[in-house]
C-alpha cells in the first residue's frame, strides 16, 4: 500500500518533496539546538535532565522526516534509473 502511493509521482515532484524534507530536517534541528541553548543559558535547575529530555525529543521528532528523506532518495534513484534505461 505504501509503495503504491509514490508510483505516479513525477521526478519533479519527488525532487520538490526531497527539498521540503531536507528543510524540515534542518529547520527542526536548528530550532531544537536553539531551544537547548536557551535552556542551557537561562535554566539553572536540573539542566542535565532537561538536556537529556530535549535531545531525546529532538531525535524522536526528526526521525520520521529522516526516514521519509531516505525513502524519497531511493525512489528518486529508481525513477532516474528508469528514465535513463528507457531512453537508451
Image (cartoon, rainbow, N blue to C red):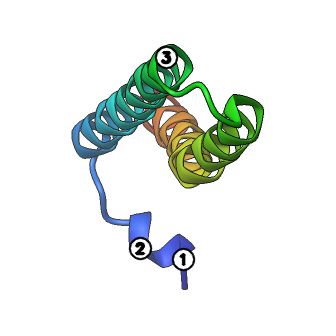
Instruction: For marks 2 and 1, give the CA distance.
Output: 6 Å
- Quadrant for the N terminus in the image: bottom right
Instruction: Tell which circle, 3 or 2, labels the residue nearer the N-terminal end.
Output: 2
Q: Is residue 87 above or below residue 37?
A: below
Q: Residues within 10 Å of mark 1 (few under 14, many from 20)?
A: few
Residue at 52%, 41% in the rendered image: 69
Q: Nearer the viewer, mark 3 or mark 2?
A: 3
Choose top left, top right, bottom left or bottom right for residue 64: bottom right
**x and y percentages locating residue 5 in the rendered image:** 41, 73
Query: Dot 1 lies on which element?
Result: loop
Q: Residues within 10 Å of mark 2 (few under 14, many from 20)?
A: few
Residue at 38%, 28% in the rendered image: 31
Residue corresponding to mark 1: 2
Instruction: For marks 3 and 2, give the CA distance.
Output: 39 Å
Q: Is residue 28 above or below residue 75?
A: above
Choose top left, top right, bottom left or bottom right for residue 22: top left
Query: Dot 3 lies on which element?
Result: helix
Instruction: Compare residues 84 and 64 and report the one nearer the observer.
Output: 64
CB-based contact (under 8 Å), mark 2 and mark 1:
yes
**x and y percentages locating residue 56 in the rendered image:** 70, 45
**x and y percentages locating residue 24 in the rendered image:** 36, 37
Instruction: Tell which circle, 3 or 1, labels the residue nearer the N-terminal end.
Output: 1
Residue at 24%, 45% in the rendered image: 13
Instruction: Compare residues 48 and 74 and report the one nearer the observer.
Output: 48
Query: Dot 2 lies on which element?
Result: helix
Q: Which mark is residue 78?
A: none
Q: Nearer the viewer, mark 3 or mark 1?
A: 3
Residue corresponding to mark 3: 37
Residue corresponding to mark 2: 5
Q: Residues within 10 Å of mark 3 (few under 14, many from 20)?
A: few
Residue at 50%, 47% in the rendered image: 65
Amino acid at each position: 500500500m505504501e509503495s503504491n502511493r509514490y508510483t505516479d509521482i513525477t521526478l519533479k515532484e519527488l525532487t520538490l518533496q526531497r527539498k521540503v524534507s531536507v528543510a524540515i530536517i534542518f529547520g527542526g534541528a536548528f530550532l531544537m539546538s536553539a531551544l537547548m541553548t536557551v535552556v542551557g543559558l537561562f535554566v539553572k535547575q536540573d539542566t542535565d535532565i532537561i538536556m537529556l529530555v530535549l535531545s531525546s525529543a529532538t531525535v524522536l521528532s526528526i526521525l520520521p522526516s529522516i526516514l521519509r528523506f531516505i525513502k524519497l532518495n531511493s525512489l528518486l534513484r529508481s525513477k532516474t534509473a528508469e528514465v535513463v534505461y528507457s531512453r537508451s
